Structures are given as structure tokens and as C-alpha cells.
Image: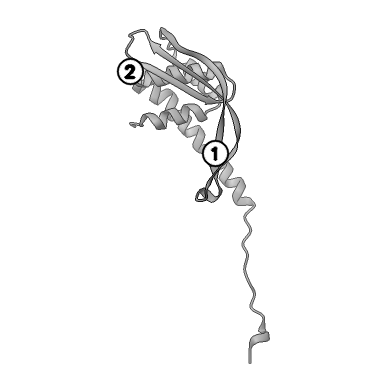
Amino acid sequence: MLLGRSKWLSYLAKSSESDLVGLYESTGLDPSYTYLRKPEIGTIMATARIGNTGQKFNAGEISVTRCSIQLEDGKIVGHGYVQGRSKKKSTVAALCDALMQSDKRTLIESKIVIKLKEIEKKRHDLIKRKAEKTKVDFFTLVRGEDEK
């Protein structure tokens, strides 16, 4: 499966730290790299739209951690932007991004990215099932008063 960069970055960013780090460590990879930007914690303003169609509004600030690394070959750069305050998760996300651009792409995609995609789908399906349990169907009964 050939995922575009924005997709794999999305799966890396949305994953839990334990899932991402655990899957990465299971690959046994330990590439040499240098930091272009060491992990930094900051905040961003999240925006939203009511019903996904209205005007944008500021929903609030969220913490993010970002990191940029360069593999030892000096050609490949990886970036990790993750929600929260985890320096380790942002570094692992940056490493995965860089390795997805290298000859290790197939390994990283099959052992990490695809599994994160499956985890996200299960999480989404669980939320959907919970929401469906609260669904209420409304209907109107016609009263016979208007009949002649």
C-alpha cells in the first residue's frame, strides 16, 4: 500500500505514544541521525467549524511537540508534530517520517504505519458504535382530528 506523506504523518501524529513507540521498537531499527530541531513543546490555536460548513472559530489552544531530524546520509529529513507534550513520541514520529522516505519504507509501512491505521480504524469504529447506541429516531403520529 503506497500512502502519501500527509497520510502517514497523520497516522503517526494521531497514534498513542505507547502504540507508536512500541511498534517502532519492535522493528529493531536504530538509525544514526542528528537533530535539526530538538523536540520543542508549544501551543497552537485549534480552529473549528460548526457542522463543518460554518465560519471558522477558535476552539482553543492545544499543546504540541515538534521535532526535526536528519538521517546520517545528510539527504533525508523527517519531521514529527504530535499533540501533547511527549518529546519521545515526536522524535520517533520524525524518525518514522525520515525512514518512510528511505529504503526502509516497506518495513516501516508494514510494521508501523499500517498497524497504526488499523488501530485508528478500531478506535473510530468503537466511537461510532457508542454513538449509535444513543441514537433516537423521532416520528410523528397523525391525529385523527383533521379528518372529515
Find disc 1 in the rendering and name its residue: 47
Q: How is this picture coloured?
A: one colour
Q: Amino acid at mark 2?
A: Ser
Q: How many numbered discs sit on the rendered protein?
A: 2
Query: What's the residue at 33%, 9% (across, down)?
Result: 74
| Front residue (pair 130, 31) | 31
- At label 1, counting other C-alpha atoms closer than 10 Å, the crowd grade (few under 14, some 14-19, many 20 or more) is few
In terms of image quadrants, where is residue 72?
top left
Q: Secondary structure at mark 2?
A: loop
Name, please, the residue furthest toward the bottom.
148
Indicate the position of residue 8 as horizontal and vertical percent values.
41, 29
Q: Amino acid at mark 1?
A: Thr
Query: Which image quadrant: the C terminus?
Result: bottom right
In terms of image quadrants, where is residue 100?
top left
- Spatial separation of the CA atoms under disc 2 and disc 1: 34 Å
| Front residue (pair 50, 55) | 55
Find disc 2 in the rendering and name its residue: 102
Judge whether 92 appears above or below 136 on screen: above
Query: What's the residue at 46%, 33% (across, down)?
Result: 117
- At label 2, counting other C-alpha atoms closer than 10 Å, the crowd grade (few under 14, some 14-19, many 20 or more) is some
| Front residue (pair 131, 94) | 94
Indicate the position of residue 31 as horizontal and vertical percent values.
41, 9
Classify residue 63 as left or right of residue 29.
right
Indicate the position of residue 1 as horizontal and vertical percent values.
34, 32
Q: Earlier in the sequence, mark 2 or mark 1?
A: 1
Classify residue 87 as left or right of residue 79.
right
Nearer the observer: mark 2 or 1; the answer is 1
Q: Give yes or no for contact between labels 2 and 1 (Cβ–Cβ under 8 Å).
A: no
Query: What's the residue at 56%, 49% (across, down)?
Result: 50
Q: Secondary structure at mark 1?
A: strand
Disc ID at residue 76 = none
Indicate the position of residue 128 as horizontal and vertical percent values.
56, 46
